[in-house]
Amino acid sequence: MSQKVLLNSKEVNIILHRLACQLIENHNDFSNAALIGIQPRGIYLAKRLARILTEEYKIKNLELGFLDITFYRDDFRRGDKPLQANTTKIDFLVENKKVVFIDDVLYTGRSIRAALTAIQSFGRPSEIELLTLIDRRFSRHLPIQPNYRGRQVDAINHEKVIVEWEEQGKKDSVYLKNS
Amino acid sequence: MSELSVNHLLGIKYLNKEDIQLIFETADHFKEVINRPIKKVPSLRDITIANLFFENSTRTKLSFELAEKRLSADIINFSASQSSVKKGETLIDTVNNILSMKVDMVVMRHPNPGAGIFLSKHVKASIINAGDGAHEHPTQALLDSYSIRERLGSVKGKKVAIVGDILHSRVALSNIFALQLQGAHVMVCGPKTLLPKHIGSLGVKVETNLRKALEWCDVANMLRVQNERMDVSYFPSTREYTQQYGVSKALLDSLKKEIVIMHPGPINRGVEITSDVADSDQAIILDQVQNGVAIRMAVIYLLASKIKQ
């Protein structure tokens, strides 16, 4: 098993600030936008971006939610492991809002497909965008592309992209694991 | 743990503590789902469920049906009164005929204790027991415990009195198993004629005085007197039963503490509880009904995830 570091904590920090600025460029003061982290792993990135936006760029009343997609996945009963649900927390209306989905790694695109279905249960957003820290090129099963990407990575199928966060008691880092 | 230890839900007796924990955690997520503007998820769109009711039911049947629809399962309904059962068909034949139409899961209520267990040994489908005679009613016990957990924070260490017709009640037996598994203390209370002879051997306290039971407990689960199952008279008159075992607001107010009142329904107003108790804030009867849908969604979802393609 080998490991290759793709991003260290300093690089992660620079990328997060760039992504935050790109979000501001498109959404100004976020009065008609909402950030939604995809459970389970997208919420760390979503929380971090929200913190940068509110603390460093003084965005007020930023709306942040978490969406669990377990019950909308297309691999129910197909995998070896049973699917376990996480908490959904969206305590604002998404109707006519510009929603930004936030996830750490974009791989096959199936999670995002599920998220697109799941969000419909909460209303009809006027627009949905996708932000991912890592975009794994050439591995998509569906025609889904990010609007904002931290870093594009070429990885082959048996390689795994691992994202770790300070909030999990580790150092911010992204690495490639060969199993 | 993210998987049930069983392939069927035949009774609480066959579950362990971790199963109940998993069902509750999954139900928490479904409770959030059923409070959304669109209360439906597509998880079970490739699953077909047959609801076989060989005995009358309103609440349980509606609750199961709603849970199945909220999960996007296809469903077929069957009630014994309009079927070939009347023409002499056996249970296994009836069910196998239904299963040959490619049904994955069976929810069954049957007047005979053990009907679900019998069926699980003879047919290839996941079975959920929705009440078998006076034996078990597992989803009711799960939703009762879930409602206690919701109201009081946890079930562990709580004192629960089950009051009324214990003898004919499947809800009582399932509740005793479920509560004990979660570390609650259980008491049964009722007239001697309606308490099974060896009920104490299940490790429950037995009390015949209602006031003493209410003074002891944190939660009172009031059961209905099941007149339809009584072939002989178990107490002199309904009026006398109400005087001895009916809970009124005056009785509750005379206690030193506020206890939670539960009832699995249907309520005989003025018999086991008075209307002012049933409609008071102390009663969580309608919460139980709402939680029933979330609990049944969780059970169906978790069992369906074990059906391999």
Image (cartoon, coloured by chain):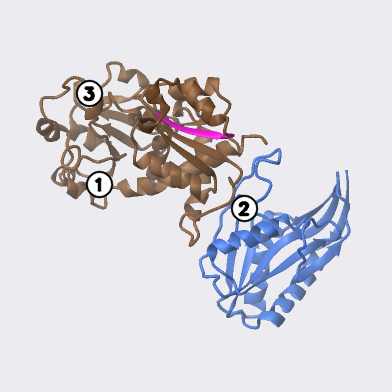
Residue B22 seen in the current view? no
Q: Examine the image and state in which quarter residue A169 appears.
A: bottom right
Whether residue A155 sits left or right of residue B56 in the image: it is right
Residue name at image x 60 percent, y 50 percent:
A71
**Does residue B132 lie above or below A30 as drawn?**
above
**Which chain is mark 2 on?**
A
Asked if badges 2 and 1 are on one and the same chain, I answer: no
Q: Is residue B291 left or right of residue A153?
A: left
Numbered mark located on residue B230 in the image: 3
Residue B37 picture location, percent across and down: 48, 62
Q: CA distance from mark 2 to mark 1?
A: 42 Å
Q: Nearer the viewer, residue B41 or B185?
A: B41
Label 2 amino acid?
Tyr
Q: Chain of mark 1?
A: B
| Label 1 environment density (alpha carbons within 10 Å; few <14, some 14–19, many ≥20) | some
As measured in the structure, the alpha-carbon distance from the residue carrying label 1 to the one carrying label 3 is 33 Å
Q: Tell which chain the image draws in blue.
A: A
User: Which residue is labeled 2 in the image?
Assistant: A72
- Residue A53 position by quadrant: bottom right
Q: What's the magenta bit mostly, secondary-structure-wise?
A: strand
Nearest to viewer (mark 2 / mark 1):
2
Circle count: 3
In the depicted structure, whether residue B193 falls above or below residue B161: above
Please name the color used to draw chain B: brown
Q: Is residue A69 magenta?
A: no
- Rendering quarter of residue B169: top left
| Disc 1, SS | loop
Residue for badge 1: B258
